[in-house]
C-alpha cells in the first residue's frame, strides 16, 4: 500500500512535467494536441544521441553521478535535448499548426496533431528501429527504506522527483514573478486584449511551444531513465498525460502538476483494488469522474 | 465386320484418351488464408505452395491438378474472415489452409469454415481455446492444426520448476488471449507438479510503468518468476523486478527468446533463466524436409511455422486423395485419419511419397505420413503434440539445455493429469 503510494508519486513526477506543457498549449492555442506526448519521445531520443556523442568526445563524462544510473554525459544531454525538443516543437508549429490555424478550425487542429503524432512516431521508428533502447544497461538496485512495511525506492526515482519539483518551482517563478509570465497569462486569458496592450502574440505562442517542448523533453528522459525508450512511448503516455491535464483543469499549470501526481498515484493504487488486467482503465475512469463532477477540471475555470 | 472392330477399337481408344485428358485438365482449388503481407508470413505461404507443386508433380490429388488460391489475412481477424469467405463462397474451396494467429483462425473457424462445412487446417495457431471448442463438439471434426498447443510449453515450464527444485513461483503474463491462456495453463501445471503459485499478475502492454504490477508479484516472495511476456514489456518488467531485489531464477516462455530481451536485461542477470520452446523432432523425415527446403529456396527453414505449414498442406492433399473425387469438406476431414494412421504404411513427404501413398490408398490401405514435423498424429480434437527444448541465454544468443522427445513430453503431460 505505502509502496504503491510512493511509486505513484514518482510516476506522477514525469506525468506532471508532460501535462504542464500540454495544458499550456491547450489553453493558449485552444486545441487538444495529441502530438504532445511525441515531444517526450523526441526529447528521450535526442538525449540518447547527445549522450552517445558526449561519451565519445568526453570519456570522463561517462562516469555515473553518485548512486544514480544517470551519467554526467546524460545530464548535459538533457539540457541539449530540452533545446532541441523546444526547437522541434517550434518547427512543428511553424510548418504545420500555424498553417492549419490560419485556415481551419479547432477540429482541423486536432486532426493535424494526430497526423503529426503518427509522423513523429514513425520517423523515430525508422531512424532508431522499433526495439527498445536504454540509457544505461546496468540495473540500479532499489534501496530498502523500511522493512515493515516493505518500502523500496530507487535512487533514480528520488532524483527524478526532486528535479521535477525544481523545474516546476522554476516555472512557477517565471509565470508569477516576471513580465514575460504576466504577458503569457494575459494571452491565455484574452489574446485580442493582450495584443491591444502590446503583447506580441506570435512570440508568446513560440514561447509556449518552447516551454512545453523542453519540459516534455525532461519528462521523456526521466521516463527513459526509469523504464525504457521506445518509438511508441508517446502513444503509451498520451492517455495518462491527457488525463492529468483534464483532471487538473485545462490551462491550470498547478492543476496539471496536481493532476499528474493524482493520475500516477491512482494508477498505482488501482492494483490494490482492481485485478491487474484492468489498471489501464484508471485514467479513463478519472477523466469520466472529473468531467461529471467538475466539468472544468479540479483547478479549471469555466470559459465562455 | 473386321472394319467395324477397328472402328470400335479406335472409338474406345479415343474415349480412353479423352478420359485421360480430362483427368489432367481438371483442377481442384485449395484455399489458403495466410498473412502474406508480413515478412514472416510469406515463407509460410510459399512452403505450402511447395507442397502443392510436389503433389502436382505426382499427378495431382483426387484425379485432378491442385491450385492453391492464396489470400492475405494481414494478421487481422476481420481481413482474415473476409479472405476466408471469399475463398469459400467465390472460389468454392472445400479445404482451407490457415490462418497463422489463433485470433484470426478462431473467427474463421466459427463464422466461415464450420458453417460452410469446409475443412480447416492451421499451420500455426497454438491457443488451447480450439481444443476446448473441439471437445465441446463445435468444430464438427473439421478443424486440425499441425502446431502444438501452448499446453506443451506450459508443461515444460512446470518441468523446469520441478527439475530446479523451485517450490514457489510468481507468474507475470501478457494480458491478451495467448498470455491469459498461458497463465491459466501454467497455474494448473505448477499446481499438479507441486509448485505453489504465489501470485499471477497480468501485464498490459503499452503501459508507462509496470512498477505496481511487479511490486504485487514480489509480495509473495517467490523463489522463481515465470514470464509469459513479449520482449518489450518483458524487458521493462524484468528490469523492474531485478531492481526491486526479485529473484534471478526465471522461467521464460518462447516469446522471450529474443536478442532484444537478452541485451536490455543483461546476460549477467540471466544466468539462472531457463526458457522453454517446442522443437522440431530429431528424425530423418525432418532432416529430409530441411534438405528439400534448402534446395528449393536456397536457405535453411528457420522462420516460424515453416515445417508445420508444409505438413498442413501435405496432409490436407493426402486426405483429399484418400477422400477421392468430389468429396465434401467433411469427407476430406474424415479422411485425415487414413493418412496419419500410426499402423499405416509409412510414406515420405515428397513427390515419390505422394505417388506411393496414392497406390496404397487406391488399394484401400492406410498410410502413415512422415513429415517435416515427424510422424504427425492428431488427437480427437485435431491437436498435435511436439518435442520440446529447454534453453538458456549465452553471449551469442541461446543454447539448448535439454531436448525433451515427443514421448517424454507426452509422458510428462500425462503425469500432470
Image: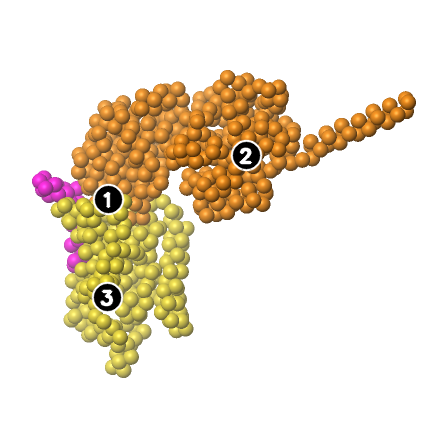
- Tell me if residue A155 is in the magenta stretch: yes
Q: CA distance from mark 3 to mark 2?
A: 59 Å
- Quarter of the image with the N terminus of chain B in it: top right
- Tell me if residue B81 is in the magenta stretch: no
Q: Return the residue at label 2.
A: B329
The image quadrant of residue A121 is: bottom left
Picture coordinates of residue B393, whole percent (x, y): 32, 31
Chain hosting mark 1: A
- The answer to whether residue A150 is left or right of residue A219 is left
The image quadrant of residue A238 is: bottom left
Residue at 23%, 67% in the rendered image: A296
The colour of chain B is orange
Q: Identify the magenta region.
A: A142-166
Q: Can residue A250 be seen?
A: yes
Picture coordinates of residue B163, whole percent (x, y): 27, 22
Q: Nearer the viewer, mark 1 or mark 2?
A: 2
Residue at 28%, 76% in the rendered image: A191
Q: Nearer the viewer, mark 3 or mark 2?
A: 2
Task: Have a look at marks 3 and 2 and say if they share a chain.
Answer: no
Q: Return the residue at label 3.
A: A295
Q: Which chain is yellow?
A: A
What is the secondary structure assignment of the residue under circle 1? loop
Q: Return the residue at label 1.
A: A275
Amino acid at each position: 500500500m505505502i509502496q504503491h503510494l510512493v511509486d505513484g508519486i514518482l510516476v506522477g513526477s514525469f506525468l506532471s512535467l508532460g501535462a504542464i506543457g500540454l495544458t499550456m498549449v491547450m489553453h493558449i492555442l485552444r486545441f487538444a494536441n495529441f502530438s504532445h506526448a511525441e515531444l517526450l519521445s523526441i526529447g528521450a531520443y535526442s538525449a540518447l544521441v547527445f549522450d552517445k556523442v558526449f561519451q565519445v568526445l568526453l570519456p570522463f563524462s561517462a562516469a555515473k553521478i553518485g548512486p544514480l544510473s544517470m551519467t554526467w554525459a546524460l545530464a548535459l544531454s538533457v539540457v541539449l535535448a530540452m533545446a532541441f525538443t523546444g526547437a522541434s516543437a517550434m518547427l512543428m508549429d511553424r510548418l504545420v499548426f500555424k498553417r492549419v490555424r490560419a485556415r481551419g478550425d479547432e477540429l482541423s487542429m486536432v486532426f493535424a496533431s494526430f497526423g503529426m503524432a503518427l509522423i513523429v512516431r514513425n520517423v523515430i521508428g525508422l531512424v532508431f528501429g522499433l526495439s527498445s533502447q536504454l540509457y544505461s544497461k546496468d540495473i540500479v538496485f532499489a534501496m530498502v527504506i523500511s522493512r515493515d512495511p516493505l518500502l523500496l525506492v530507487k535512487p533514480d526515482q528520488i532524483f527524478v522527483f526532486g528535479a521535477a519539483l525544481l523545474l516546476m518551482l522554476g516555472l512557477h517563478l517565471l509565470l508569477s514573478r516576471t513580465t514575460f509570465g504576466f504577458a503569457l497569462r494575459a494571452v491565455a486569458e484574452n489574446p485580442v486584449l493582450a495584443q491591444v496592450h502590446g503583447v506580441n502574440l506570435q512570440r508568446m505562442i513560440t514561447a509556449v511551444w518552447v516551454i512545453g517542448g523542453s519540459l516534455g523533453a525532461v519528462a521523456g528522459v526521466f521516463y527513459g531513465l526509469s523504464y525504457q525508450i521506445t518509438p511508441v512511448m508517446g502513444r503509451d503516455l498520451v492517455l495518462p498525460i491527457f488525463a492529468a491535464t483534464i483532471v487538473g483543469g485545462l490551462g491550470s499549470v498547478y492543476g496539471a502538476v496536481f493532476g499528474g501526481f493524482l493520475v500516477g498515484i491512482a494508477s498505482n493504487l488501482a492494483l490494490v483494488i482492481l485485478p491487474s488486467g484492468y489498471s489501464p482503465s484508471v485514467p479513463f475512469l478519472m477523466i469520466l469522474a472529473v468531467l461529471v463532477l467538475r466539468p472544468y477540471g479540479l483547478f479549471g475555470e469555466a470559459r465562455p | 465386320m473386321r472394319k467395324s472392330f477397328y472402328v470400335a477399337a479406335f472409338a474406345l481408344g479415343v474415349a480412353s484418351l479423352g478420359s485421360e485428358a480430362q483427368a489432367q485438365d481438371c483442377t481442384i482449388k485449395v484455399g489458403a488464408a495466410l498473412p502474406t503481407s508480413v515478412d514472416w508470413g510469406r515463407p509460410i505461404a510459399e512452403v505450402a505452395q511447395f507442397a502443392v507443386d510436389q503433389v502436382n508433380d505426382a499427378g495431382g490429388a483426387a484425379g485432378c491438378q491442385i491450385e492453391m488460391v492464396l489470400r492475405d489475412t494481414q494478421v487481422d481477424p476481420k481481413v482474415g474472415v473476409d479472405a476466408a469467405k471469399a475463398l469459400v463462397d467465390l472460389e468454392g474451396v472445400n479445404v482451407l489452409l490457415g490462418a497463422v494467429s489463433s485470433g484470426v483462425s478462431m473467427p474463421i473457424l466459427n463464422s466461415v469454415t464450420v458453417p460452410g462445412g469446409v475443412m480447416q487446417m492451421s499451420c500455426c495457431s497454438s491457443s488451447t481455446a480450439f481444443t476446448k471448442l473441439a471437445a465441446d463438439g463445435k468444430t464438427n471434426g473439421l478443424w486440425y492444426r499441425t502446431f502444438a498447443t501452448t499446453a506443451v510449453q506450459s508443461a515444460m515450464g512446470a518441468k523446469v520448476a520441478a527439475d530446479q527444485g523451485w517450490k514457489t513461483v510468481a507468474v507475470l503474463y501478457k494480458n491478451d488471449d495467448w498470455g491469459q491462456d498461458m497463465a491459466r495453463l501454467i497455474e494448473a501445471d505448477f499446481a499438479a507438479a507441486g509448485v505453489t503459485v504465489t501470485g499471477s499478475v497480468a501485464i498490459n502492454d503499452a503501459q508507462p510503468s509496470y512498477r505496481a504490477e511487479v511490486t504485487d508479484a514480489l509480495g509473495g516472495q517467490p523463489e522463481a518468476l515465470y514470464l509469459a511476456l513479449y520482449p518489450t514489456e518483458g524487458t521493462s518488467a524484468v528490469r523492474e523486478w531485478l531492481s526491486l531485489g526479485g529473484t534471478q531464477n526465471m522461467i521464460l516462455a518462447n516469446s522471450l527468446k529474443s536478442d532484444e530481451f537478452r541485451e536490455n536485461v543483461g546476460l549477467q542477470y540471466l544466468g539462472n533463466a531457463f526458457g522453454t520452446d517446442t522443437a522440431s523432432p530429431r528424425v530423418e523425415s525432418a532432416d529430409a524436409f530441411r534438405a528439400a527446403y534448402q534446395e528449393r529456396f536456397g536457405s535453411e527453414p528457420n522462420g516460424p511455422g515453416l515445417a508445420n505449414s508444409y505438413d498442413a498442406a501435405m496432409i490436407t492433399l493426402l486426405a483429399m486423395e484418400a477422400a477421392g473425387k468430389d468429396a465434401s469438406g467433411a469427407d476430406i476431414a474424415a479422411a485425415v485419419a487414413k493418412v496419419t494412421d500410426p499402423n499405416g504404411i509409412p510414406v515420405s513427404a515428397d513427390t515419390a511419397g505422394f505417388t506411393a501413398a496414392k497406390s496404397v490408398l487406391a488399394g484401400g490401405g492406410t498410410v502413415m505420413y512422415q513429415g517435416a514435423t515427424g510422424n504427425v498424429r492428431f488427437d480427437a480434437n485435431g491437436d498435435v503434440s511436439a518435442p520440446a527444448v529447454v534453453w538458456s541465454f549465452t553471449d551469442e544468443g541461446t543454447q539448448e539445455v535439454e531436448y525433451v522427445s515427443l514421448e517424454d513430453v507426452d509422458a510428462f503431460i500425462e503425469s500432470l493429469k
